[in-house]
Image (spheres, helix red, strand yellow):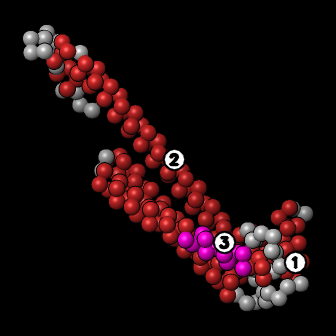
Amino acid sequence: MRNSARICKRLRGVQEGTNMNKQDNALWRELISNLREQRRHIRALIGLAREQTHALAEANVQRLAEITQEQALHLDEIDMLEHHRKDVARRIGEAVGLHAQPPTLSDCACLAPENAARALKWLQRELLQDIRQLQTLNERNRTLVQHAAETVNTWLALVVNAASNQASYHPQSSTGVAVILNTEV
């Protein structure tokens, strides 16, 4: 028997001796609603990460600032929702006699009525997939920012080197100033 199946069987055994009515769906609806709302915010972050990629490629600093503000709002909402989700999980755990620690989402899926369990398992899979996609997009954007910073640093070093060479900037210098200044970046 798989480890998760063993855990589910043990959790159901704990639940049988409690006063939680498995058909009372209030906590399950609350948990599912919370996870759907978290997923909505994560999907919005995915869209913003894609926009961020385009803004980075276009060097659109104003749009990057707007995206950063929008991302912060979504992250604040996710943080509040996550605190609420933990509270709901704690209440579910207490209702089934799990006082040591709140049940995980997988534990909740084991304890929930069949329809709620299906919804929880689906949401768990979708959330994991969405989070992985967001991580990939964020990593790509981080790499773009890193490359842009390296390019700027390289050009700054070239300009500083040219500026420190006094002969290049002297009016009677035989070295042309335009060597670096007329080069397109």
Residue 38 in the image: above or below residue 171? below
As drawn, which residue projects farthest toward the top?
174
The span from disc 3 to disc 2 (Cα, nearest Å) is 28 Å
Residue 98 in which image quadrant:
bottom right
Badge 1 density bin: few <14, some 14–19, many ≥20, Cα 10 Å: some
Task: Report which residue position mark 3 lands on.
Answer: 86
Which of the two discs, 2 and 1, sits closer to the camera? 1
**In the image: residue 64, left or right of residue 101:** left
Task: Report which residue position mark 1 lands on.
Answer: 14
Task: Report which residue position mark 2 lands on.
Answer: 139
In percent of width and height, residue 155 lies at: 31, 29
* Mark 2 touches mark 1? (CB < 8 Å): no
In percent of width and height, residue 166 lies at: 20, 15
Badge 2 density bin: few <14, some 14–19, many ≥20, Cα 10 Å: few
The residue stretch that appears in magenta: 80-91
Residue 168 in the image: above or below residue 116? above
**In the image: residue 63, left or right of residue 138:** left
> Which kind of residue does numbered mark 1 sit on?
Val
In percent of width and height, residue 91 lies at: 72, 79
Which of the two discs, 3 and 2, sits closer to the camera? 3
The span from disc 3 to disc 1 (Cα, nearest Å) is 20 Å
As drawn, which residue projects farthest toward the front?
100
Does the magenta run of residues contain 21?
no
**In the image: residue 9, left or right of residue 123:** right
